[in-house]
Amino acid sequence: MLGLLAPGLTACFEEPAPHEAIRDFLVGWQTGDYAMAARRADAEEAGVRKALGDFGLHLDAASIRFKLGQITVDGENAKAAFQAEVDLGENTPLWTYDSVLPLHLVEGRWKVRWSPTVMHPDLHEGQRLAVKADPQGRQPIVDRNGDTLQDADTLYVAQVIPAQLADPARLCQDLAKITGFAQDRLLSRVLSAPPTDAVPLATFGRRKFDEIQAQLNRIEGLKIAIVHPPVAPKSPVQIVGRVTAVTAESEQQLGGPQRAGDTVGRDGLQRAYQDQLTGSTETRVIVLDTKTADTVKELKSWPGRNNTPVQTTLDAGLQQAADNAVNGDLPAALVAVDAPTGQIRAVATKTLHQENDALAGKFPPGTTFSVVATDALLKSGLDVGQKIPCTADRTVGGARFQQTGVISSAPTFEADFAHGCVTALASLARRVDERTLAASAAQFGIGAKWGLPLNSFSGSTPGGTSDAARAKIIAGSIVRVSPLVMALVAGAVQSGTWHPPTLVTSPAAPDPVTDSDPPPSPPDAVPLDAGRAAELRALMRVGVTSGSARAAAAPGDPVYGVASMVSYVEKKERRQLSWFVGWQGDIAVAVMVESADPAAAATIAGSFFSGTQKEF
């Protein structure tokens, strides 16, 4: 770079050699000391200073640097080859071009022979450079059938036509005071644009626009364009995510005063896939006729990265059924997945958060976790026909368990499982060892490293080193899961294979924040033992036909499932959760409800399954 080369030049050369003139001109131009550069030109200094300053302004250049090439001297004339590197900012590659600096002796001093071609070989009198940016509109997020998951919203774009402005600097100063955007960046955008193009400077949502509309109206030359991009999220709103106009704070993160589409994803998939949805702005450097504003020549163009829709696995029809099912008075979360693939079909909540609770929540599953524990018990030789008493109270290794609604007569394990009898299930802690229990949990994906683009929790089980610990794991009281975890457990039993969850099929993953921060790859699918999976299916069918999950029964294909109640303390407050885990057809679900009613979750599941039979 010239900055490294200049000291060598000053130490080795004196007039009448041209090297000091070359150094002064290029270093002055590069560092913004246009007065120093102008003193080495053979033209009127004020005009040269303005031309060099305008060169950077008209390009909205973040920096200009030079590499000096060969210098040739022929009597009183000389030429210096150089390469310019112009940083146009806003994620645009460096613009490089080659040129020649002509010099001649004027009264014994070397001077640059001034003309616009000094700045660029294709620039002539009556012309200027400009940067033309063509942003692409924000692409949609769509469900698995390609239907958009957004409605049209209203945004207000504050824009100007540079040729119509009497005082661009004053306008940008006034707008900066209102919006918080940097005045110099706004002005650079105005001065670098073709003078007859509409230049967007700021975008506002309806609420913000209503607050500042009167102030904006007082800025002479500012025009407001109303646009209706499809950015208002449909259900599931917190998964799809919201979009907001770029603010002074978010522009610092995005780079440049405005980006493609003038919107930024605030949360959900809109935030995770911001770069893919907006792409990048197509940028062109052009030569303009200063009188007509016509394009004389295009010097360089960058097409930008194409923006693309984000294809999700969500199903709009199933989502509506899920929304209808949870639309009661109780806080609830429902996650539905496609059992054969693990693809997430619907995420619905009431009061709870779809991402933070349904996907990433950490809740005790109660005896619905017996689905996982029973796999380990079967592996250890349990006979489901064995009679195991369901008592009102039992202590295992010092841990006490209590059961409400004791099953009459002498129930088998099948009946205990179907009714979620916690005392009977906990009593089996001595029938399974820690390693076997941990292996079954891992087989059902508990604790796996998922590759979802949103926050999620894959579950955790503590070590089962004692009878009490294993009893609590079987009872699901010290295990922590999200509703998504349990929906995948149900899907694994239905299909015979545990599948990692998938929410987005294209693109496979959002761009990492840095090259050293790639998204995790999803784990492989895990086949279950065919025999044990068949026994689990039979047990879960009984759970609906004659067990505690009877409220989940619905028209159509048979419903399989298990229900439970669990009480626990969180932040010194006691909470009660009703759970249902099961499936109908290929749709596996987990429902969690904050309620003391043991049937609350199963009732919502039954409503969901009934709703899926309708046409949406």
Image (cartoon, rainbow, N blue to C red):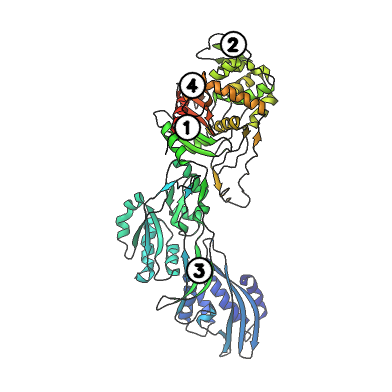
Circle 1: element type: strand
The answer to which of marks 2 and 4 sits earlier in the sequence is 2
Give the amino acid at mark 1: Ala
Q: Position of residue 207 (x, y in %)?
A: 35, 49
Tell me the CA gap for discs 4 and 3. Answer: 66 Å
The answer to which of marks 4 and 3 sits earlier in the sequence is 3
The answer to which of marks 1 and 3 sits earlier in the sequence is 3
The answer to which of marks 1 and 4 sits earlier in the sequence is 1
- Determine which of the numbered discs, if any, sits on residue 284 in the image: 3
Give the amino acid at mark 4: Arg
Callout 3 crowding tier (Cα within 10 Å): few <14, some 14–19, many ≥20? some
Q: Nearer the viewer, residue 5 or 273?
A: 273
Q: Residue at x 47, y 37 (%)?
A: 318
Relative to 257, residue 80 above or below: below
Tell me the CA gap for discs 1 and 2. Answer: 33 Å
Q: Is residue 462 left or right of residue 569?
A: right
